[in-house]
């Protein structure tokens, strides 16, 4: 079993839709949770970072962590064509930082 | 400018050859990481180092080796034992646990 599972998609939505991206994990030692966005053949860029259960909001993005269920989510409101990219969840514990498979998102005008 | 520099941008390997990918950072970060990315896939952890002269295997370390003789440098050698080395390799660093991860621009390795 992989430590982090993420649905690879692809996911296609119309402009303005609410997007929900999810990851599950098996290692309860993970303490820090991140969401990255990656455009083709570029280094990923950090979108959201949290270390506690609950919600964290930043503009159109909301990160949600449920440690009891080992489940994290990223919500994108009012999605834009410029949001089209691959979204990766990442988790960290004791220095080890691993990523999910990434979900490819396409927002159609 | 502070950042992470990976070189070369493109690299070709012949059968049975070892190749080394360079990663240098001037951010004064303690932790450094190597990831492999295959088309349509996420990032898989190869090796990581939290301090000079120490490193740990990631999830796919077989066929790879690293060294961490200096804080600024974390080179990755792809050995001939790695039978499927064609991939995009990303180096990253951060100050420590819970800190933001910074990425280099990547190296695309292909087999001739």
Image: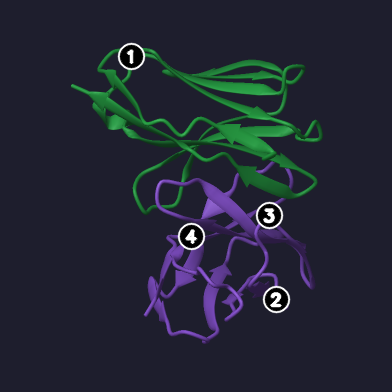
Comes first in the chain, label 4 or label 3: 3
Return the x and y of residue B51 as percentages of the image width and height: 78, 64
Image height of B81 relative to B104, above or below: below
* Residue B28 visible (yes or no): yes
Residues at marks 2 and 3, common chain? Answer: yes
Comes first in the chain, label 2 or label 3: 3
Return the x and y of residue A26 as percentages of the image width and height: 74, 32
Please identify which colour was used for chain A in the image.
Answer: green
How far, Cα to Cα, is label 4 from label 1? 31 Å
Instruction: Chain letter for mark 3, please.
Output: B
**In the image, what residue occupies the spot 18% across and 21% down?**
A109
Crowd rating for badge 2 (residues with CA inside 10 Å; few <14, some 14–19, many 20+): some
Mark 4 or 3, closer to the camera: 3
Instruction: Chain letter for mark 1, please.
Output: A
Image height of A12 relative to B104, above or below: above
**In the image, what residue occupies the spot 32% across and 19% down?**
A79
Could you say which chain is coloured purple in the image? B
- Give SS at disc 3: loop
Q: State the residue position of label 4.
A: B104
Q: State the residue position of label 1.
A: A78
Image height of A93 relative to B81, above or below: above
Return the x and y of residue A49 as percentages of the image width and height: 60, 31
Q: State the residue position of label 3.
A: B59
């Amino acid at each position: 079993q992989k430590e982090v599972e993420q649905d690879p998609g692809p996911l296609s939505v119309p402009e303005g839709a609410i997007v929900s991206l999810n990851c599950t994990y098996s290692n309860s030692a993970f303490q820090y949770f991140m969401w990255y966005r990656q455009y083709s053949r570029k280094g990923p860029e950090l979108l959201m970072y949290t270390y506690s259960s609950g919600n964290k909001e930043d503009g159109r993005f909301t990160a949600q962590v449920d440690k009891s269920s080992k489940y994290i989510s990223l919500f994108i409101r009012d999605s834009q064509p410029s949001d089209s990219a691959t979204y990766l969840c990442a988790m960290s514990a004791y220095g080890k930082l691993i990523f999910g498979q990434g979900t490819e998102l396409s927002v159609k005008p | 400018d502070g950042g992470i520099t990976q070189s070369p941008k493109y690299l070709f390997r012949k059968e049975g050859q070892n190749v080394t990918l360079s990663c240098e950072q001037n951010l004064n970060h303690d932790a450094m990481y190597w990831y492999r990315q295959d088309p349509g896939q996420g990032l898989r952890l190869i090796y990581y180092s939290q301090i000079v002269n120490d490193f740990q295997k990631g999830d796919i370390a077989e066929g790879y080796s690293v060294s961490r003789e200096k804080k600024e440098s974390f080179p990755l050698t792809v050995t001939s034992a790695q039978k499927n080395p064609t991939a995009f390799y990303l180096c990253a660093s951060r100050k420590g646990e819970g800190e933001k991860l910074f990425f280099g621009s990547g190296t695309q390795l292909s087999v001739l």
